[in-house]
């Protein structure tokens, strides 16, 4: 099987300010204090499935050099630069159209760059099962996550039956629900978090984009005339910004009848907030989550502290706070108010 991995690494991650900024977004940062960035952790997760020379990364043209430094094993020609963000449908269409021209039998896994998966062996098994299903099929497989709580920050996938670790038909995709609705999904048992991970063969996804997102397909066809030539960057600069700005969920998944899901309890989290990051950072005896060698805490509890750049940081007497420092920017914020971090990051 000709397997390829497409990593989407163009997001900004503004909810993790001041650590994540437009200049250095969260996928390029060692969020968890483990010596690896989220991009590197994501790539490592797929190495049992696919060799690095079949990895592709789609990112902003501003981040290409970061990708090169952090994933030197990925061929430079397979780091695809977006001149401006147009959401996930054009991003995916670009990568899969280019892959299909040199690898017409490719089976592709598309994944975000900034999530964590704790049960990696189980994840590998699920991806391999999805690849086998998609290789000679006209269907798309999406990876669902067994919900552990009635989360309101994720979209949900409604499956035709309650079967973990099995490929089943998708009945519908649901937008981010309110808490009452999310609780009903959890009780039903056949609803799964949408992790934004997709598996398909390139023929299938190109056909689905042509059918359901013809404007994007048209732009891809115009760009494709220049793929693998010296004029590719110029063509992408011209046509990519003309693509409709739309997610792959809206563009294809919610319209197609050919979508299946394989779901499991994978210990997955998209690390989209300081609270979620804190859940994966080692805790002190006082239940503080701490990253930073030069941080000292006194009389603190239930705090998330991330300060790897600090010459010295002393925090006393806080309960339930985020304390984050990066490049001279400092934020001290109640965890209960973290939904306001975008507002806080805008400055005066």
Image (tube, rainbow, N blue to C red):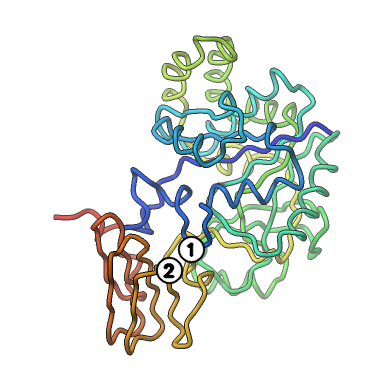
Q: Which mark is residue 291?
A: 2
* Dot 1 and dot 2 residues touching (CB under 8 Å): yes
Residue drawn at 47 percent across, 56 percent down = 30
Q: Position of residue 99 (x, y in %)?
A: 67, 25
Q: Position of residue 200 (x, y in %)?
A: 74, 37
As drawn, 183 above or below 70: below
Identify the secondary structure beneath mark 2. strand
Q: Earlier in the sequence, mark 1 or mark 2?
A: 1
Identify the image quadrant of residue 338.
bottom left
Identify the image quadrant of residue 312.
bottom left
Q: Is residue 134 left or right of residue 85?
A: right
Residue drawn at 74 percent across, 45 percent down = 141
Q: How many marks?
A: 2
Residue drawn at 36 percent across, 74 percent down = 335
Q: Is residue 267 left or right of residue 215?
A: right
Q: Which residue is mark 1?
A: 33
């Amino acid at each position: 099987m000709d397997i390829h991995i497409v990593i989407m690494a163009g997001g900004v991650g503004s909810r993790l300010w001041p650590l994540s900024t437009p200049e250095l977004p969260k996928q390029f940062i060692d969020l968890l204090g483990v010596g690896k960035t989220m991009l590197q952790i994501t790539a490592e997760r797929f190495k049992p499935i696919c060799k690095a020379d079949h990895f592709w990364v789609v990112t902003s043209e501003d981040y290409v050099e970061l990708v090169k430094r952090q994933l030197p094993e990925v061929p430079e020609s397979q780091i695809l630069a977006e001149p401006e963000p147009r959401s996930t449908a054009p991003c995916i269409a670009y990568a899969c159209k280019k892959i299909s021209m040199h690898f017409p039998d490719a089976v592709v896994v598309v994944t975000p760059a900034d999530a964590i998966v704790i049960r990696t062996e189980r994840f590998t098994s699920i991806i391999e099962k999805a690849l086998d299903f998609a290789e000679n099929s006209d269907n798309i497989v999406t990876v669902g996550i067994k919900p552990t709580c009635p989360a309101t920050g994720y979209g949900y996938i409604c499956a035709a039956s309650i079967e973990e670790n099995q490929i089943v038909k998708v009945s519908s995709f649901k937008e981010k629900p309110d808490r009452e609705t999310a609780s009903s999904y959890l009780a039903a048992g056949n609803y799964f978090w949408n992790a934004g991970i997709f598996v398909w063969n390139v023929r299938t996804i190109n056909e689905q984009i042509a059918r359901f997102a013809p404007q994007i397909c048209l732009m891809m066809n115009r760009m494709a005339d220049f793929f693998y030539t010296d004029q590719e960057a110029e063509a992408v600069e011209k046509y990519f910004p003309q693509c409709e700005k739309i997610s792959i969920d809206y563009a294809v998944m919610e319209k197609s009848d050919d979508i299946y899901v394989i779901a499991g309890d994978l210990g997955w989290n998209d690390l989209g907030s300081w609270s979620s990051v804190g859940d994966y950072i080692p805790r002190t005896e006082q239940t503080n989550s701490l990253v930073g060698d030069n941080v000292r805490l006194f009389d603190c509890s239930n705090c998330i502290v991330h300060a790897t750049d600090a010459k010295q940081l002393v925090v006393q007497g806080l309960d339930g706070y985020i304390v984050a420092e990066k490049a001279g920017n400092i934020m001290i914020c109640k965890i209960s108010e973290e939904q306001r971090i975008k507002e806080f990051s805008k400055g005066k």
